[in-house]
């Protein structure tokens, strides 16, 4: 826990606007790297009494008090905020505080939280049943929408999470090629299945674990790791493992080491090498899918992989994963082919409904233009606030995904990302929380915007960023 944790429960403040109205400048002047900062305002007071009580109780019930590690705020300290409800671009905690939300349930909330259109369709569907365990037409509808939008996908299989999609696609790559080895990249996360828990970015990096105990060596000794954006390293691995590599999997824009953009030539090079070596290329678009562009990151980059994994957005807030690709490859999946993969709740009607409505909304004209415009303005505002206050910062955005690091940059790999000042990030994170802005509680996570973020939300956030950057 950082030192921040000591200083965050004080007088009651209900709303971010109220926080701003009650703030007083201290007049303190700080000097940083030769830059004379402006008068620094004191941090507004944030009351989190109920959050603390609930989280304390949770620690006796759930391991670490959470059901997914990064939610525990371990790398930024201060204790997590316990949510009461979410709506549009905002989340509300159990103490009555309101925040502009840039986590969006870790990606799914791209149409805004608790979207009316999605909710109405879900309400209508729930009366017809929440799980069939039998074919339903909604699976065809969402499947066809995915096929129509995603260049690499000719057939798709729905499952229940991104983890499940990635572990299934790994089996497809192996079944189709008859080879065992795979290449992944340092800092890329593909869910928590054993073979991927090698240099796996965000959650694992946040906890400072090199790998996870409980993963047998046998499960990872066919996983070969290369630095991101390093085509020569990939070529070398192929040379050293001639005829043994089933495929290459990567995030086509990294969000699990913070926000890292690939060189287009890197992706094109991977496409060429895999083709030449008889291996398959998989884009893990669990995070980037339908967020970077209507046809996912592969459309944005103009590079078509053989296989694609999806999750998050495609479930519109319900648990969904999916994998798809070329018809001749997907034909190995049972019962069309011999490769076994199944799921009791896979393709369930509620998840399909939320996905269909979400993709419909995203398909409306102007959706991605809005995401791109507000997110660019947001990240530029944050970077400018950082530089004005004398911090080394670098970062960027594509469509509704963004991130920045507290270092000079450029950040092109996980090794570069680790040069960021994570203590400063922790102070930034807590400072923004106090200002009514909810950001991912780790340097190694990307941020997300959605269609309900307004220009006013961005103004509000940039103004907060200026105050926080000045006092951290
Ligand atoms: C790129 C990527 N792949 C896979 C996963 C795993 O998805 P899930 O958490 O739904 O299991 C994630 C989760 O954040 C992800 O970002």
Image (spheres, grey):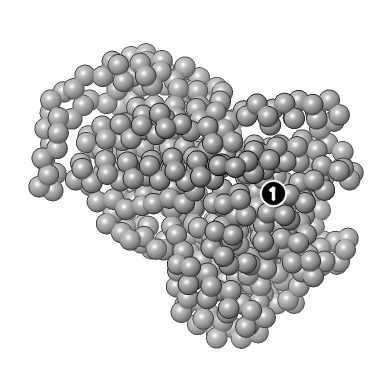
How many numbered marks have been drawn onto this rendered protein structure? 1
**Label 1: few (<14), some (14–19) or many (≥20) C-alpha neighbours in 10 Å:** many
- 84 lies above or below 409: above
Residue marked by disc 1: 321
Q: Secondary structure at mark 1?
A: strand
Q: Position of residue 114 (x, y in %)?
A: 62, 28
Q: Position of residue 339 (x, y in %)?
A: 81, 65
Q: Position of residue 463 (x, y in %)?
A: 30, 31
Q: Which residue is located at x 12 percent, y 25 percent? A: 27
Q: Which residue is located at x 31 percent, y 31 percent? A: 464
Asked where in the image residue 13 lies, by quadrant, the reply is top left
Q: Position of residue 37 (x, y in %)?
A: 14, 37
Is the CB–ligand 1 distance for label 1 below 8 Å?
yes
- 186 lies above or below 289: below
> Residue lying furthest front in this view?
365
Q: Is residue 124 left or right of residue 24?
A: right
- 84 lies above or below 4: above
Compare residues 147 and 430 and report the one nearer the observer. 147
The image quadrant where one finds the N terminus is top left
- 210 lies above or below 447: below
Q: Which residue is located at x 47 percent, y 76 percent? A: 231
Asked whether residue 417 is in view, the answer is yes
Asked whether residue 198 is in view, the answer is no
Asked where in the image residue 428 lies, by quadrant, the reply is top left
Q: Which residue is located at x 36 percent, y 29 percent? A: 460
């Amino acid at each position: 826990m950082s030192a921040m944790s000591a200083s965050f429960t004080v007088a009651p403040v209900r709303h971010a606007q109220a926080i701003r109205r009650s703030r007083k400048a201290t007049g303190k002047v700080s000097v940083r790297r030769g830059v004379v900062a402006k008068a620094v305002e004191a941090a507004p007071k944030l009351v989190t009494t109920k959050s603390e009580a609930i989280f304390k109780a949770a620690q006796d019930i759930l391991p670490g008090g959470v059901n997914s590690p990064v939610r525990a705020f371990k790398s930024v300290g201060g204790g997590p905020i316990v949510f009461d409800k979410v709506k549009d671009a905002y989340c509300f905690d159990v103490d009555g505080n309101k925040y502009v939300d840039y986590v969006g349930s870790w990606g799914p909330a791209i149409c805004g939280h608790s979207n009316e259109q999605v909710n109405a369709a879900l309400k209508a569907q729930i009366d017809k049943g929440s799980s069939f365990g039998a074919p339903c037409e909604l699976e065809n509808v969402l499947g066809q929408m995915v096929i129509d939008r995603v260049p690499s996908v000719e057939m798709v299989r729905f499952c229940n999470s991104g983890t499940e999609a990635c572990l299934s696609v790994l089996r497809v790559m192996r079944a189709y090629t008859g080879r065992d080895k795979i290449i992944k990249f340092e800092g890329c996360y593909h869910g928590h299945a054993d073979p991927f828990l090698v240099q796996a970015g965000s959650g694992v990096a946040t906890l400072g674990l090199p790998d996870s105990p409980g993963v047998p060596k046998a499960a990872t000794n066919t996983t070969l790791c290369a630095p991101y954006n390093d085509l020569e390293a990939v070529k070398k691995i192929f040379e050293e493992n001639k005829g043994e590599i089933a495929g290459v999997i990567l995030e086509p824009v990294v969000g699990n080491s913070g926000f890292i953009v690939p060189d287009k030539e890197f992706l094109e090079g991977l496409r060429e090498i895999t083709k030449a070596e008889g291996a398959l290329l998989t884009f893990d678009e669990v995070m980037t899918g339908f967020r970077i562009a209507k046809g996912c990151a592969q459309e944005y980059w103009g590079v078509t992989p053989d296989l694609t994994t999806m999750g998050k957005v495609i479930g519109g807030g319900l648990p969904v994963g999916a994998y798809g690709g070329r018809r001749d490859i997907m034909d190995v999946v049972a019962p069309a082919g011999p490769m076994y993969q199944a799921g009791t709740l896979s393709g369930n009607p509620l998840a399909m409904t939320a996905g269909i409505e979400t993709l419909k909304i995203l398909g409306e004209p102007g959706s991605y233009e809005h995401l791109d415009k507000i997110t660019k303005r947001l990240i530029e505002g944050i970077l400018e606030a950082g530089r004005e206050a004398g911090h080394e910062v670098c970062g960027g955005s594509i469509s509704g995904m963004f991130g920045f690091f507290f270092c000079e940059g450029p950040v092109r790999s996980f090794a570069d990302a680790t040069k960021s000042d994570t203590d400063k990030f922790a102070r930034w994170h807590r400072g923004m929380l106090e200002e009514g802005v909810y950001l991912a509680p780790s340097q190694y996570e990307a941020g997300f915007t959605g269609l309900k973020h307004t220009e006013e939300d961005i103004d509000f956030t940039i103004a907060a960023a200026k105050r926080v950057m000045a006092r951290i």
